[in-house]
Amino acid sequence: MRYSPQDLYKKILGGAGERRAAAFLKKQGCKILKRNYRTPFGEADIVAQDGGDIVFAEVKTRTGDAFGSPAAAVDGRKRRRYRDIARYFLSSLGAEVNIRFDVLEVTKEGVEWLKNAFEG
């Protein structure tokens, strides 16, 4: 499958944003457990451990604000998918853990970490 120039640009921009977000989380003391964690329900950009919490993080990268804030793109469908991904991940752990759903907005100005961006 061939990518259009626009698709390729989005893929490169998204990958760069995910690398910046992962580096940011590490600096904040998080342990990155998985990147681009693929399940039958979809993919989580980052699964990390933040203290006693397992964090399922969606990374949204933007070069401008023409389409609104990056977090605004995390709609109900994406939230439902993240909940399914979390259930899938947790089924393999076999232990009770606290989970959280975060969004990391990556812009040219930096990384904004929105903890508890939506409910599980």
Image: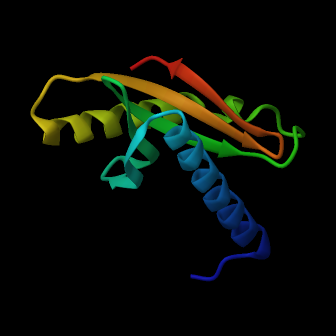
The image quarter containing residue 76 is top right
Q: Position of residue 113 (x, y in %)?
A: 62, 29
Q: Position of residue 103 (x, y in %)?
A: 58, 32
Find the residue positioned furthest to the bottom: 2
The image quarter containing residue 12 is bottom right
Q: Nearer the viewer, residue 88 or 45?
A: 45
Q: Nearer the viewer, residue 100 or 29?
A: 29
Find the residue positioned furthest to the left: 94
- Residue for point 73% across, 75% down: 4
- Residue for point 30% across, 52% down: 40
Work out whether 39 lies above or below 96. below
- Residue for point 43% across, 36% down: 30
Q: Quadrant of the N terminus?
A: bottom right
Q: Position of residue 77 (x, y in %)?
A: 51, 34
- Residue 39 lies left or right of residue 44; in this view the side is left
Work out whether 2 lies above or below 76. below
Work out whether 11 lies above or below 105. below
- Residue 76 lies left or right of residue 3; in this view the side is left
- Residue 74 lies left or right of residue 37; in this view the side is right
Work out whether 91 lies above or below 21. above
Q: Quadrant of the C terminus?
A: top left
Q: Position of residue 24 (x, y in %)?
A: 59, 42
Q: Disc count in the image?
A: 0
- Residue 16 lies left or right of residue 88; in this view the side is right
